[in-house]
Amino acid sequence: MLAAVALLWALPAAAVDLNSADAETMAEELTGVGEVRAEAIVEYREEHGPFESVGELTEVRGIGSATLEKNRDSLAVGAAEE
């Protein structure tokens, strides 16, 4: 049983897709991203279209390279929804 718990602990969390996640999900799952920054990410996506790379996140006002690096392993950029 203890081995099973340890295995679950070691599994990476599901990545947050910048092109489909809502602001609430981003605020809950990303380090250093609260509701205001999460809303800014969604607004950026709506104004500029889908993210082409995780690095593009730094184009969002209030998101710097430190925030990106804290979350890089938790982020994904999936296909834009049709």
Image (tube, rainbow, N blue to C red):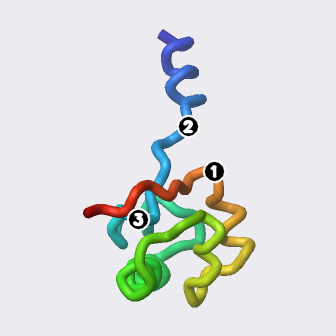
Question: Mark 1, mark 3: which one is toward the viewer?
Answer: 3
Q: Are marks 1 and 3 in contact (CB under 8 Å)?
A: no
In the image, residue 33 sits, relative to residue 7, either above or below, namely below
Secondary structure of the residue carrying numbered label 1: helix
Residue 82 spot, x, y in % from top left: 25, 63
Q: Choose the circle earlier in sequence order: 1 or 3.
A: 3
Residue 51 or residue 57, whichever sits in front? 51
Q: Are marks 1 and 2 in contact (CB under 8 Å)?
A: yes
| Residue denoted by label 3 | 19
Residue 22 spot, x, y in % from top left: 33, 68
Badge 2 density bin: few <14, some 14–19, many ≥20, Cα 10 Å: few
Q: Is residue 51 left or right of residue 70?
A: left
Residue drawn at x 49%, y 49% as measured from the top left: 15
Distance between the alpha carbons at the discs numbered 1 and 2: 9 Å
| Residue denoted by label 2 | 12
The three-letter code of the residue at mark 2 reads Pro
| Residue denoted by label 1 | 73
Secondary structure of the residue carrying numbered label 2: loop
Badge 1 density bin: few <14, some 14–19, many ≥20, Cα 10 Å: some
The three-letter code of the residue at mark 3 reads Asn
Residue 71 or residue 46, whichever sits in front? 46
In the image, residue 71 sits, relative to residue 47, either above or below, namely above
Residue 9 spot, x, y in % from top left: 55, 30
Question: Mark 3, mark 2: which one is toward the viewer?
Answer: 3
Q: Quadrant of residue 78?
A: bottom left
Residue drawn at x 73%, y 74% as measured from the top left: 65
Residue drawn at x 65%, y 57% as measured from the top left: 72
Q: Choose the circle earlier in sequence order: 1 or 2.
A: 2
Residue 21 spot, x, y in % from top left: 36, 63
